[in-house]
Image (spheres, helix red, strand yellow):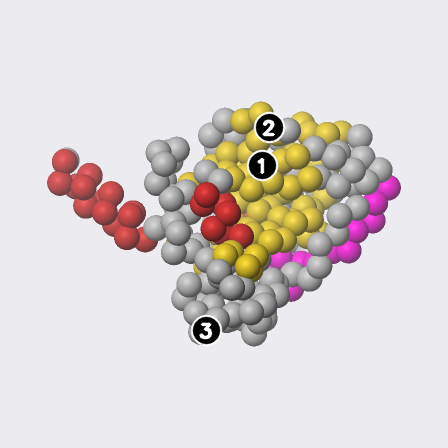
Amino acid sequence: MKVLGTLLASAAVAQAHFTMQYIWNNGVDQGQNTYLRIPPNNNPVTDVTSKDMTCNVNGLSGSNVATASINAGATITFEWHQHAQRTGEDPISGGHKGPVQVYIAKAPSSAASFDGQGTVWTKIYSSGLLNPSSQQWATDVVNSNGGKHSVTIPASLPAGEYLLRAEIIALHVASSYPGAQFYIGCAQVKINGGGNGNPPKIAIPGYYKASDPGITVNIYNNLQSYTAPGGSVWSG
Ligand SMILES: [Cu+2]
């Protein structure tokens, strides 16, 4: 058993992939794997046309997942790790360079029964190449911040149940397609309060293309600017 455990551990380290494991509501940790649709492993999605792009593998339903009650205008923090732990290793592995984005989609009824298909997703956060001279990426900030990044839920979003989808795109092998690695985590939330906002929406999958300059890109050629896929951020 010891040998098998060692082999499994080294295989996991070699892959150096990661998953979303926690959300925080206004600074309060909600507990590991709570309110989240959990994928079977920490592998990325690489086919931008796959339904796995929506909420990762096995992510089209959340019937066994509870839905978090949050307020419009809340700060939601997402926390990612390579393995099921908070040990101090690089949370998402320092070799993974790329943008961090967050989308939200309103469920027709319950978040738990929503598959997130169709033109339903609004981008509410995007961070990419932060400093061209030092080649600092949003992922570097996530690593230095214990695997965490945050978003403000736009106060004008209508009340109701939503899927909240965070995405980290690792571009270290993205110079040809498929290559970019999409790490995706979806949380189920119910927004209280809110307003009458009517944000622009895209389909995921659907909107992202293999030819997008933010998806097939060589980041090791002194890149001076970066355009993340999915269009612009709506902040309410
Ligand atoms: Cu990886």
**What label does residue 103 carry, if any?**
none
- SS for callout 1: strand
**What label does residue 77 carry, if any?**
1
Residue type for callout 2 = Gly
Q: Is residue 51 visible?
A: no
Query: Is residue 40 located in the magenta-colored stretch of the structure?
Result: no
> What crowding class fits label 1: few (fewer than 14 Cα within 10 Å), some (14-19), or many (20 or more)?
many
- SS for callout 2: loop
Residue type for callout 1 = Thr
**What label does residue 221 carry, if any?**
3
Image coordinates of residue 162 in percent, x first then y, are 68, 40
Q: Which residue is mark 2?
A: 27
- SS for callout 3: loop
Q: Which residues are magenta?
A: 196-207
Q: Residue at x 29, y 48 (%)?
A: 13
Horizontal relation, residue 226 to residue 39: left or right: right
Q: Residue at x 54, y 27 (%)?
A: 29
Image coordinates of residue 55 in percent, x first then y, are 55, 48
Magenta stretch: dominant SS?
Answer: loop
Image coordinates of residue 168 in percent, x first then y, are 52, 52
Give the farthest residue toward the right: 196
Query: Is residue 205 located in the magenta-colored stretch of the structure?
Result: yes
Q: Residue at x 29, y 47 (%)?
A: 12
- Real-space CA distance between mark 1 and mark 3, rounded to the nearest whole angstrom: 32 Å
